[in-house]
Image: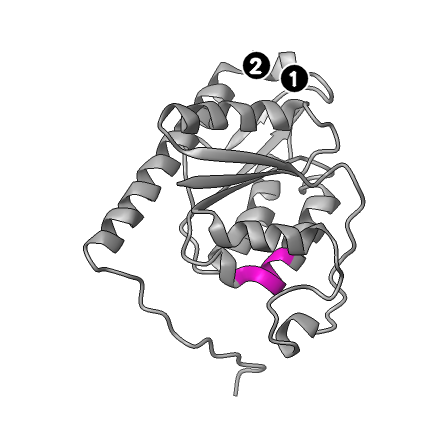
Amino acid sequence: MKVLMFNGSSNHKGCTYTALAKIEKTLNQRDIETEIIDVGNNPIADCTGCQYCRKSGQGKCVLEDYVNICIEKCKEADGFIFASPVYFGHPSGRLLSFMDRLFYAGGYALAYKPAAAVVSARRAGTTSALDSIIKHFTINNMPVVPSNYWNLIHGKLNSPEEAKQDKEGIQTMHVVGLNMVWLLHCIEAGKQAGFEPEKVIKINTNFIR
């Protein structure tokens, strides 16, 4: 089993990475393969709503960049973690642009697989940032991985050592990892027992009559 971990921070090994590293350690100790992917180091174009991904039938974005590479990676993954620092009460713009295009063009590669949202902040804005990320999961048939507190960690900008001092935050990340392992095995056990989710064709209602 493999979990892809997307780091939406522009700081390669800052507080957000510290949170992911703790989850990664928990997963690796339980024989879950992981890969941390940095999506916050470079600008990522926003979705233009061109509909190429839907009309072409290719299941990828018209922009040939890292989003399409990650769609292919998602096809082979079993679970996902999307992490970001808090910017003005929301995730980084890079992560949101990445997720919008990833889910719009390649949501089929993530559907019915568990996902967790993780955020880091100096102080506030964490719950609204988590909400922005999690909405991508719940519109795409994805079980949301919880913890024993909201999935957040505190630390000053560029201060991973301070984030490590947030004992509750570190434990929260550990529990995220434990619950990811649990859900992955539950889903696999269901498949082995011949139980799969019932898939329906989505109805798009443009207005209420």
Q: Residue furthest bottom?
A: 209
Q: Position of residue 116 (x, y in %)?
A: 48, 41
Q: Position of residue 125 (x, y in %)?
A: 64, 36
On the question of residue 109 being in view, the answer is yes
Quarter location, residue 62: bottom right
Q: Which mark is residue 160?
A: 1
Main secondary structure along the magenta-highlighted residues: helix
The answer to which of 120 and 102 lies nearer the viewer is 102
In the rendered image, residue 86 lying in the magenta stretch gets the answer no
Taking the spot 50% from the left edge, 58% from the top edge, the residue there is: 109
Q: Secondary structure at mark 1?
A: helix
Q: Which mark is residue 65?
A: none
> Gap between marks 2 and 1, in whole Å?
6 Å
| Residue type highlighted by circle 2 | Lys
Q: Position of residue 86 (x, y in %)?
A: 68, 35
Q: Are the two marked residues, 2 and 1, in contact with CB atoms closer than 8 angstroms?
A: yes
Taking the spot 63% from the left edge, 38% from the top edge, the residue there is: 37
The answer to which of 9 and 188 lies nearer the viewer is 188
| Residue type highlighted by circle 1 | Pro
Mark 1 is surrounded, within 10 Å at the Cα level, by few (under 14), some (14 to 19) or many (20 or more) other residues, namely some
Q: Is residue 169 above or below residue 116?
A: above
Q: Which mark is residue 164?
A: 2
Q: Which residues are magenta?
A: 102-107
Q: Is residue 158 above or below residue 102?
A: above
Q: Position of residue 48 (x, y in %)?
A: 77, 66
Q: Residue furthest left?
A: 193
